[in-house]
Each structure stands twice: as structure tokens, then as C-alpha cells.
Amino acid sequence: TYIIRPAKSAEEIVTEGRVLHHCVGGDNYLGKHDRGETYILFLRFKDTPNMQYVTVEIEATTPNILQWYGAHDKKPDQENIQKWLNRYIRMLVTGTLRTAGMPAMAIAYSA
């Protein structure tokens, strides 16, 4: 149903915040992302991977979700998305997503 992938650029993060009307595109989030303190990930529907849906911020040092929000700081389909994200984090923790020496958070994942 969903895919998750890392932000490709600061411009993409700013666009995400503008389209979804939340604060991810602000200097605070960009700074943390640029310093490698957190990763900004985009959760999308598989059938519309270029349409903004949910933004996820996770810690860079330990796979832990700091926050996730959709448009206007709402949590759409909260129960299902939280379960999906929890599975994703478990896969990060167990190393299931690590390939070719890339950090797991840098790999797109779909399930």
C-alpha cells in the first residue's frame, strides 16, 4: 500500500512542508537533517509515489520515529500508518533493510 523514501534534497523538504502545510520545510528541520541528526522521509501510496501524503522524521543514530504528520499536521489513517511505520522501524533495527553498505534510512522501502 505504501512506500517510504528519504528526501532527496532540501528543496524537496521545503516543497513537502508547503504542499502539506506543516513546518517540515522550516530551518529547524532542514538544519537537523543537514547536520545528520535526523532523517526526513516521505511516506507515499505505491500507486501515487510523487504525491505528498505523510512526512516522517526519524533519529539518525537510532531508528526511532520522532514524529509523523500528513496535511495540516493531521495523522491520516493513524492506526494503519503507525502499524506500518512500526514494522519499518523493526526492519531497520534488525538490519533487514541494509544493502550494499548503504545506511538503512537511505533505502526506499515498500510493503
Image (spheres, rainbow, N blue to C red):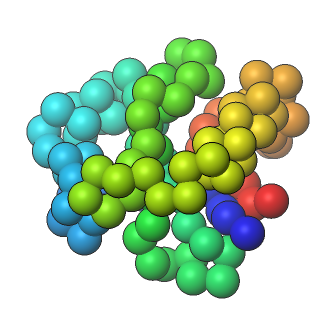
Of 61 and 2, nearer the camera is: 2
Indicate left or right for 64 with 107 as reference: left
Tell me if I can see residue 4 in this picture: yes
Specify whether residue 15 is in view. Answer: no
In-image side of 51 versus 98 (left or right)? left
Q: Position of residue 73 (x, y in %)?
A: 29, 51
Quadrant of the frame with the N terminus: bottom right
Q: Residue at x 25, y 47 (%)?
A: 24
- Image coordinates of residue 103 in percent, x first then y, are 65, 34
Q: Is residue 102 above or below residue 51?
A: above
Q: Quadrant of residue 26?
A: top left
Q: Position of residue 92 (x, y in %)?
A: 74, 31
Where 8 falls versus 98 (above or below)? below
Task: Quadrant for residue 9, please give it.
Answer: bottom left
Location of residue 5 by image quarter: bottom right
Up/down of 51 relative to 105, above or below: below
* Residue positioned 48% across, 59% down in the render: 76
